Amino acid sequence: MRGLYAIYRKEMNHYFVSPVAYVVVCIFLVLAGVFFNYIMSQVIRYSFEAGMESMQMGGAGMNIDVPSMVLRGFLSILGTIVLFLTPLLTMGVYSEERKRGTMELLMTSPITDSDIVLGKFLASFSLLVIMLLPTVFYVIYMFAHSAPAAPWRLIAGGYLGVLLLGGMLLALGSCLSSLTENQIVSGVLIFGLSLLLWLLDIFTQGGNSAFAKSLQYGAVLQHYDPFIRGIVDTTGLVFFGSWIVLGIFLTMRSIESMRWRRA
Amino acid sequence: MIEVQDLTKSYGEKTAVDRITFSVNKGEILGFLGPNGAGKTTTMRVLTGYLPATQGTAKIAGFDVFNDSMEVRRRIGYLPETPPLYFDMTVSGYLDFVARIKNVPLEKRAQRVEAAIEMAGLAEQRDQLIKRLSRGFKQRVGLAQAIVHDPDVIILDEPTVGLDPKQIIEVRHLIKGLAGSHTIILSTHILPEVSMTCDRVVIINHGKIVAVDTPENLTLQLKGGERIRVEAQAPEQPLRDVLQKIPGAQRVQIESVGSSGRMIATVEASQGQDLRSQIAAQVVGQGWPLYELRGQSLSLEEIFLQLTTEDPAQKKAEESK
């Protein structure tokens, strides 16, 4: 446990001493801010237009749930940004250690492989939380100032979804990073993999064969979608949870195999 | 303290370490000497539990390096070939981190970090980022890292690489100072280092142990006695014949000096024999003017070369295969 904490501390220190965290968080927040603003103004304009239209038709005006629509759109975009940025957080996690020879220090120290893997995973996950935290204020602001108030289930579900999605990408990213000494290679690998999982949905659309259906089940989007509609579905929890556990497990095996692979 | 029995490590087809056996007593400094690629680093990596052995066993403080890896790791400090440094940490921050992962208890941690900084002579650099340090200082941080938790066994892979002569002397003093309370294995390809710091030497080449002894004994035993340099005015072949006939002469090498007709012969005598008087008598007896006669002892360096250098002719034959 002490080893885990030492690794966690070191990783956090690394993120915030080097420009990595600042650059990633900064880009993330700029993108998130721009999209939030854009979605908000689009939805508001749409609701005005729709309202006007229905009035012209002599109706009583349509009720459009602006906060929910904004939230849904925003959380959906948030997932995409997370997809694009998490590879940057994990691509160096093990590659860098291997290249610098510090893996040799960690592996000859009295700490377990799981201390190393979990410490690193928790650190990158913490950074993800730190990255997402400021966007919560947009949502809280909207929650407080909109009528009807934005549904809190949607907010909670959506953020849970983003965290699970991010956690999955971090776990898989770490695993891929442990396979190579080259940061670029590991970055491209994790990016390619997450993109593939993301696109699986589009590729398999309309397919009715058992094969297409089982592929569809692997599509990240399929499982992320219910969360941003405020539905916390066990299928999704199991899906993301399994990927996270699998990623961590494989990373541990990969670290362990470093002792053997050179053989 | 350290026992290595028939240790073999193969990388696929290639055998890096071939059935080596040695042991190190508590408080001793053992030098691991060999040319590059001899298997020094591999042996150390097996000892630290970083690599598994293909065959054979290694034990540190009675614990098998593979089966009881955790117990072994608790007891060793290890400086790998390239110091394992985090460049964006400060020296003291880094040592604190290492102390944490080496299980140094909280109440002792600050004191141990201080002691390591002190011992490695890093007091002025303590708050600097490691990436800003020169190579020599980086090496010292690596050394400090290996001793920060006051381990029983210290394993140092080429500890003086990259240091300037003054620093080398300091580091050697540091290592000598650690002996007694710590058991140390250090590897090097620099010979004076071994004779200056180590109690015993293991000479390794192509993964095999060529010799194990104290530096003094090695010099005594392996040099094959004296080597004598003879300068005389004599025809080459007869001189060679005469010298070779002297009982005890093992190897005679002759080269001519310019066009003066003088020859320099080097005679290697077997152990404990002084052939100088006989050589003088023989050369003068032949009526050849004798210009110089000098006994030379082989340095450890030459022994090392003799032990680890293959016959060039044989090597060529192997290459042409």
Image (tube, grey):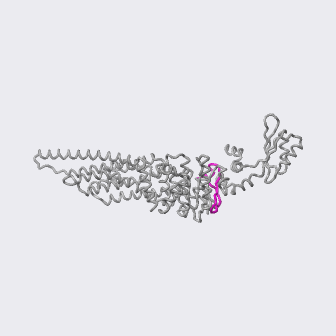
- Whether residue A241 is in magenta: the answer is no
Q: Determine whether, in the image, residue B35 is placed left or right of residue A215.
A: right
- Check the picture and name the quadrant holding the N terminus of chain B: bottom right
Q: Could you say which is closer to the camera, residue B177 or residue B145?
A: B177
Q: Determine whether, in the image, residue A248 is placed left or right of residue A156.
A: right
Q: Could you say which is closer to the camera, residue B76 or residue B199?
A: B199
Residue A253 can be seen in this image: yes
Residue B118 x %, y % = 54, 55
Residue B39 can be seen in this image: no
Q: Which residue lies most toward the front here? A: B124
The magenta segment = B12-38
Q: Which residue lies most toward the top here? A: B259
- Whether residue B27 is in magenta: the answer is yes
Residue B225 x %, y % = 78, 52
Q: Which residue lies most toward the bottom here? A: B62
Residue A176 x %, y % = 44, 51
Quarter of the figure with residue A148 = bottom left
Residue A183 x %, y % = 46, 47
